[in-house]
Image (spheres, rainbow, N blue to C red):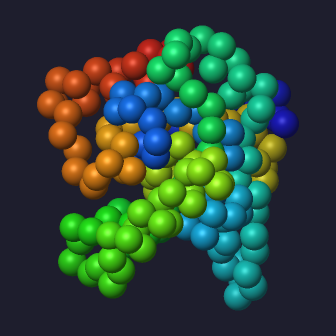
């Protein structure tokens, strides 16, 4: 890795099998098919890049946390609704049973602890160029229990601030 650069993405996410307010440090990002690669087109050719984060940096951040800070995999989807298995979007061509089967597979088989939309590209890019990087996200809900955030705004602000404080 390039010793002169460290990049850390701080954000929010939906949890998967973790309590709201849990801070997830991403060790590896998975796409919506649960593969650890970002796929893109470069001059008309498909290119796959591994979305892996710096192990030492992730472990260092984990050591700074408490029991509400965990290390795991993040599923990074192409969109907020269909890609994440939400039932409340304009297009929903699947059932609650389909959604739960997929989210359970992501969590229990692939080890996904949270869902968002940025880490796959960020991890693939930084890994490809050799920059040490990490993603740190607060979880706003457990998607195994529903699609809607029920926490109060002051709670959400506290969750976000805990993620920021961990990094700073």
Extreme residue toward the bottom, this view:
44
Tell me, yes or no, if residue 115 can be seen here. yes
Q: Residue 20: percent from the left, percent from the top?
A: 35, 33
For image coordinates 36% across by 28% down, the residue present is: 21
Asked whether, in this view, residue 73 is left or right of residue 159, the answer is: right
What is the quadrant of residue 154 in the picture? top left
What is the quadrant of residue 85 in the picture? bottom left
Front residue of this view, candidates 135 and 110: 110
For image coordinates 39% across by 37% down, the residue present is: 139
Tell me, yes or no, if residue 8 can be seen here. no
Q: Quadrant of the N terminus?
A: top right
Front residue of this view, candidates 62 and 118: 62
Front residue of this view, candidates 72 and 133: 72
Front residue of this view, candidates 94 and 54: 94
Q: Total of numbered circles in the picture?
A: 0
Q: Residue 7: percent from the left, percent from the top?
A: 63, 34
What is the quadrant of residue 81 in the picture? bottom left
For image coordinates 65% across by 13% down, the residue present is: 63
Asked whether, in this view, residue 85 is left or right of residue 122, the answer is: left
16 relative to 124, above or below:
above
């Amino acid at each position: 890795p390039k010793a002169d650069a460290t990049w850390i993405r701080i954000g929010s996410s939906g949890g998967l099998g973790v309590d709201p307010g849990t801070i997830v440090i991403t060790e590896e990002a998975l796409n919506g098919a649960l593969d650890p690669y970002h796929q893109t087109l470069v001059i008309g050719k498909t290119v796959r890049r591994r979305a892996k984060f710096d192990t030492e940096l992730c472990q260092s951040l984990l050591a700074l946390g408490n029991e509400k800070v965990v290390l795991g995999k993040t599923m990074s989807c192409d969109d907020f609704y269909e890609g994440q298995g939400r039932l409340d979007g304009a297009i929903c061509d699947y059932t609650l049973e389909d959604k739960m089967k997929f989210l359970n597979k992501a969590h229990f088989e692939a080890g996904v602890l949270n869902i968002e939309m940025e880490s796959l590209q960020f991890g693939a890019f930084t890994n490809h160029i050799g920059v040490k990087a990490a993603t740190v996200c607060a979880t706003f809900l457990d998607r195994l229990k529903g699609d809607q955030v029920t926490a109060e705004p002051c709670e959400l602000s506290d969750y976000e601030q805990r993620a920021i404080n961990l990094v700073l």
